[in-house]
Amino acid sequence: MPGTTIYAQGSLQTPTFSAVLDALHVNADGSLTQIGTPFSFPSPFGDGDGPIAVDPKGRWVFAMVAGNGAEIIQPVLRNADGSLGAAAATAVNISDQKCNSNIVATNIAIDPQGKNLFVSCNPSGTSTFEGIQVYGINQTTGGLSRINSFATQHLFEALSSDRQGWRVF
């Protein structure tokens, strides 16, 4: 849709691969224009192909990246023009919480009020949890703190929340 901003992840090969998150403005003709400078994730996170979720109030962009056998969710400041700022808060290492995500499928969602972020977890390697983990979003900093886990017997390919944030699908 013209006039909107989209966010895309990728990897840059400098001496080594480095994951980046980029803000792009959609022009009236459908072409894209880069807004600001891409956000670079800290080393060793070089796999920039993970899911992205934008805070419904437009304050932060949450991106999942992988590297060295770990996966993190990094909150990034979103500026008023849609460009990206610095890291909003410390990244959450979901691997430390026995969660492994199918990083190629959309598997993070934010409720419409911007209070909770949901992550689907699949057991793989040393990660043993299968289900959904719920993180509270600090309304001042964008920081994430795990508040609950729901074990299931299903692997998830996608997550979504209803408009009130009462149900996760």
Image: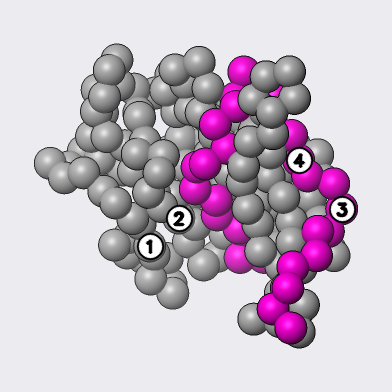
Q: In percent of the image, x 38 and y 62: which residue is there? A: 160
Q: Residues within 10 Å of mark 3 (few under 14, many from 20)?
A: some
Is 32 placed above or below 87 here? below
Q: Tag on residue 39?
A: 4
Magenta region includes residue 79? no
Q: CA distance from mark 2 to mark 3?
A: 25 Å
Q: In percent of the image, x 35 and y 29: which residue is there? A: 100
Q: Residues within 10 Å of mark 2 (few under 14, many from 20)?
A: many
Q: CA distance from mark 4 to mark 2?
A: 21 Å
Residue in front for this viewpoint, 25 or 60? 25
Q: Upstream in the sequence, badge 2 or badge 3?
A: 3
Task: Quickly name the residue at label 1.
Answer: 160
Could you tell me which quadrant the C terminus lies in?
A: bottom left
Task: Quickly name the residue at label 3.
Answer: 36
Q: Tag on residue 109?
A: 2
Residue in front for this viewpoint, 67 or 60? 67
- Could you say whether the residue bearing mark 3 is in a helix, strand or loop? loop
- Could you say whether the residue bearing mark 1 is in a helix, strand or loop? loop
Residue in front for this viewpoint, 30 or 48? 30
Q: CA distance from mark 4 to mark 3?
A: 9 Å
Q: Upstream in the sequence, badge 1 or badge 3?
A: 3
The number of callouts visible is 4
Q: CA distance from mark 1 to mark 3?
A: 29 Å
Q: Is residue 137 visible?
A: yes
Q: CA distance from mark 4 to mark 1?
A: 25 Å
Between disc 2 and disc 3, the foreground one is: 3
Residue 23 sits in quarter? bottom right
* Side of 139 relative to 33 (left or right): left
Callout 1–callout 2 Cβ contact below 8 Å: yes
Between disc 4 and disc 2, the foreground one is: 4
* Side of 139 relative to 126 (left or right): right
